[in-house]
Image: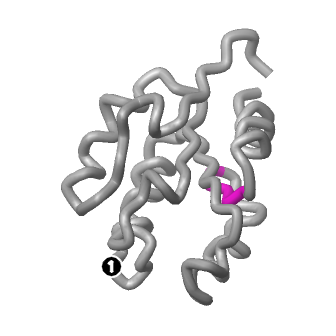
Amino acid sequence: MKADVHIRTAAELGLTFRDAGDTAQVLGAIYGLDGLILSVADLSAEFLNLRTGLLGELFQTFVNWRLPVAVVVPDPAAHGERFAELAREHARHPSIRFVPSEAQARQWLETQTG
């Protein structure tokens, strides 16, 4: 792990994702970060509804910029069967992980900063 790991939460950066236009705000905010923690509180129902494709677009932005992201979701099933399936599919994803707590998010992100 690097000595000066820069991991921030979306809330610390003032990031919220309410509609499609909010994805554009990410690029300036994530510059220089080693990892980002998102919580369900940072994401509107529109992002949590996988049919809109907004969460997928947001995740693709993070993957393209090679920024590991941990998404804190204590109970993925509370957001629907498809969302819970997405969380399971990302159990071993190298860039995006769903975790139940911020502590676990930080722990995983710290291992990604090699």
| Residue drawn at the location 67% of the way across and 60% of the way down | 98
Residue that sits furthest to the left in the current view: 21
Residue 80 is inside the magenta segment: no
Q: Nearer the viewer, residue 107 or 2?
A: 107
Over which residues does the magenta segment extend?
Answer: 95-99
- Is residue 63 shown above or below 113? below
| Residue drawn at the location 41% of the way across and 78% of the way down | 49
Secondary-structure class at tag 1: helix
- Is residue 48 shown above or below 98? below
| Residue drawn at the location 61% of the way across and 76% of the way down | 86
Image quarter hosting the N terminus: top right
Image quarter hosting the C terminus: top right
Q: Is residue 51 left or right of residue 85?
A: left
Q: Is residue 9 left or right of residue 31?
A: right
Q: Position of residue 101 (x, y in %)?
A: 73, 50
Q: Crowding near pointer 1: few (<14 within 10 Å), some, many (20+)?
A: few
Q: Position of residue 11 (x, y in %)?
A: 45, 37
Residue 96 is inside the magenta segment: yes
> Which quadrant of the view contains residue 54?
bottom left
How many numbered marks are there? 1
- What secondary structure predominates along the stretch shown in magenta? strand
Q: Position of residue 29 (x, y in %)?
A: 36, 30
- Is residue 52 shown above or below 42? below
Q: Position of residue 107 (x, y in %)?
A: 80, 37
Residue that sits furthest to the top in the current view: 3
Q: Nearer the viewer, residue 65 or 80?
A: 80
Q: Nearer the viewer, residue 105 or 90?
A: 105
Instruction: Name the colouring of the figure.
Output: one colour
> Which quadrant of the view contains residue 57?
bottom left
Type of the residue with mark 1: Thr
Q: To which residue does mark 1 refer?
A: 52
| Residue drawn at the location 50% of the way across and 50% of the way down | 63
